[in-house]
């Protein structure tokens, strides 16, 4: 046992050393080593588990056969537990079903009218961050930790890991009803990441997983230092942590903290088994401080025996795939993240172009979202202003760039910039034509960077591949369609004559001409997006919620752009997403 634990610690040290050595960005080959390192860690931790089971006084050696409860027994135990905590069945018009098309879901026990509340959950059921802190024994090391302070979901994750290994856990009936495994990005193999090549989200996916890995190593060392005051270190395995963060990031929601102190993060048993539908397109779940309850209203009329759904909010496939482990074939909220970046080339010219961009309120390296239907949504405001500067020749750049002052070569790296009226002034007809041409070339370059064509992906989809591969195909196909539509739209504008193109302009505020070139590069924290994400209840294709269903996918209430939605009458935003390196 001691040797097995020592092997685990050694592997964690090797992981830390490797991750520091390759730095914040990595390629697929380097990431393959990362995955291999964690597979070695998993093997080492399995050896610890085996050593525990082989102890003479271990329950595994008692000779008693462990009988796993059936789904019906799990649901019955969960409902009895809820009633023991004060659940009012008279206010509930749905029941849990483990055999819906998505896995676990809620079925109407009577006809329900649109807008009618079908469930009410008292706050006594909530697993909040204060509840988790109390359950962990109020350890000061967790209370004062900066990582946990910045991302409360981590505290919930640690608590779930502890309760998962506790056979007498107060929360056991709920935990046992949760999925045993998710299809979140943490469970991907190298095959899934390789299939994602060409997508702008491959780098994000790798960074997201590496962020969780670094956090795990950090937390493992911290818990190990407490000498089992939080939990036995042998219980805090990578597999348990991955399950916990997948549960938390996909299901947690802010609820009212009381006393005007804002909101706190919470898991809400029973309510979080409701699956997603885009029908209605409006949020119908609300927290009510006056009754200290969460309620959900029907998004449409439901007949007795039908599955009842809720709308989580607008989520694109990238958010769903990264945070919940699934994507939909048709997603009206999809967009393509397109990075605007100057070529390296001549350092002085590039430096001048950065100044020209900043004069216009644009940052080099900014990411804009290309719409699915550019003819109606037009183009991102920053797109053409950026490519006007991009298209400038060296001579043209020198002619209009501000003079360079020795010693003042800093830029707004990470600093917030706002678009200025100057950004929308056409320079010359020749420059305008070059800007459009360069933009088309850049978009075609992105489209050609995929190792497969749109037609090949669509043919592969017809073969009904396994769940993860299918979801990645959904995402890549939609990305390619968005690129293709934007290319065709811009080419149509070129054919029309770029000087004849008019766009609706944003409302702009005139700003001071002072240029504060502070070097603000941000805090490089390891908080890779495991913060406030919403529901993942799992199941089959088009509906979310990874309830441990057939394909165990799920719906995320959030994602990388921190799209919160309000679930409460007091504007308590359900921030189901945060793009910080958790």
Image (tube, helix red, strand yellow):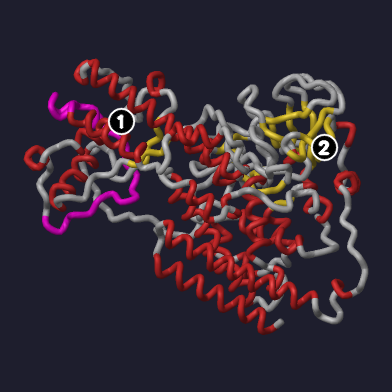
Disc 2 versus disc 1: distance between alpha carbons?
A: 54 Å
Residue 123: give x, y in percent of width and height: 77, 44
**In this view, the mark in front (2 or 1):** 2
Mark 2 or mark 1: name the one nearer the start of the chain: 2
> Which SS does the magenta portion mostly show?
loop
Q: Is residue 13 left or right of residue 228?
A: left
Label 1 crowd (10 A; few <14 / some 14-19 / many >=20): few
Q: Nearer the viewer, residue 522 or 239?
A: 239
Give the residue furthest to the right.
64
| Residue 428 colored in magenta in the image | yes
| Residue 143 colored in magenta in the image | no
In this rendering, is residue 138 above or below 414? below
Disc on res. 509: 1
Residue 233: give x, y in percent of width and height: 68, 73
Q: Secondary structure at mark 1?
A: loop
Residue 553: give x, y in percent of width and height: 65, 43
Q: Which residues are magenta?
A: 406-433
Q: Secondary structure at mark 2?
A: strand
Residue shown at 13% from the left, 51% from the top: 348
Q: Is residue 263 left or right of residue 104?
A: left
| Residue 568 seen from this side | no
Label 2 crowd (10 A; few <14 / some 14-19 / many >=20): some
Corner quadrant of residue 21 = bottom left
Q: Which residue is mark 2?
A: 97
């Amino acid at each position: 046992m001691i040797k097995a634990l020592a092997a685990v610690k050694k592997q964690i040290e090797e992981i830390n050393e490797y991750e520091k050595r390759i730095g914040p960005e990595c390629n697929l080959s380097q990431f393959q080593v990362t995955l291999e390192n964690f597979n070695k860690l998993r093997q080492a931790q399995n050896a610890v588990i085996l050593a525990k089971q082989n102890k003479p006084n271990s329950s595994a050696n008692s000779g008693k056969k462990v009988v796993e409860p059936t789904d019906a027994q799990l649901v019955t135990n969960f409902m009895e537990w809820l009633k023991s905590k004060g659940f009012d069945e008279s206010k509930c018009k749905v029941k849990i079903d483990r055999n819906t098309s998505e896995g676990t879901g809620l079925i109407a026990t009577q006809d329900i009218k649109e807008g009618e509340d079908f469930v009410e959950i008292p706050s006594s059921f909530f697993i909040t961050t204060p509840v988790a802190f109390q359950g962990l024994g109020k350890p000061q090391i967790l209370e004062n930790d900066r990582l946990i302070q910045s991302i409360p979901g981590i505290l919930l994750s640690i608590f779930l890991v502890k309760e998962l290994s506790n056979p007498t856990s107060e929360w056991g009936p709920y935990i046992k009803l949760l999925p045993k495994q998710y299809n979140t990005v943490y469970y991907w193999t190298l095959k899934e990441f390789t299939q994602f090549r060409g997508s702008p989200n491959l780098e994000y996916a790798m960074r997201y997983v590496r962020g969780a890995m670094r956090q795990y190593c950090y937390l493992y060392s911290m818990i190990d230092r407490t000498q089992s005051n939080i939990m036995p270190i042998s219980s805090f395995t990578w597999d348990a942590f991955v399950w916990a963060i997948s549960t938390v990031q996909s299901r947690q929601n802010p609820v009212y903290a009381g006393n005007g102190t804002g909101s706190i993060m919470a898991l809400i048993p029973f309510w979080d088994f409701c699956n997603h539908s885009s029908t209605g397109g409006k949020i119908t779940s609300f927290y009510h401080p006056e009754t200290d309850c969460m309620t959900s209203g029907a998004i449409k009329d439901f007949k007795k025996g039908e599955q009842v759904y809720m709308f989580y909010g607008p989520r694109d496939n990238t958010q769903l795939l990264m945070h919940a482990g699934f994507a939909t074939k048709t997603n009206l909220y999809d967009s393509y993240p397109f990075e605007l970046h100057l070529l390296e080339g001549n350092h002085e010219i590039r430096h001048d172009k950065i100044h020209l961009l900043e004069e216009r309120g644009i940052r080099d390296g900014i990411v804009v979202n290309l719409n699915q239907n550019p003819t109606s949504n037009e183009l991102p405001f920053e797109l053409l202003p950026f490519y006007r500067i991009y298209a400038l020749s060296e001579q043209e750049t020198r002619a209009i760039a501000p003079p360079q002052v020795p010693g003042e070569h800093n830029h707004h790296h990470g600093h917030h910039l706002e678009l200025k009226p100057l950004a929308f002034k056409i320079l010359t007809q020749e420059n305008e034509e070059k800007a459009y041409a360069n933009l088309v070339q850049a978009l075609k370059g992105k489209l050609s960077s995929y190792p497969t064509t749109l037609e090949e992906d669509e043919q592969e989809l017809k073969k009904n591949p396994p769940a993860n591969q299918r979801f990645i195909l959904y995402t890549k196909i939609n990305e390619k369609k968005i690129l293709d539509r934007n290319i065709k739209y811009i080419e149509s504008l070129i054919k029309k004559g770029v000087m004849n193109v008019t766009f609706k302009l944003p409302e702009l505020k005139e700003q001071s001409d002072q240029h504060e070139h502070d070097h603000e590069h941000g805090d490089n924290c390891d908080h890779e997006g495991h913060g406030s994400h919403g529901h993942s209840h799992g199941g089959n294709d088009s509906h979310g919620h990874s309830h441990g269903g057939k394909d165990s996918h799920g719906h995320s209430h959030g994602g990388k752009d921190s799209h919160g939605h309000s679930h409460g009458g007091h504007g308590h935003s359900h921030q189901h997403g945060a793009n910080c390196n958790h």
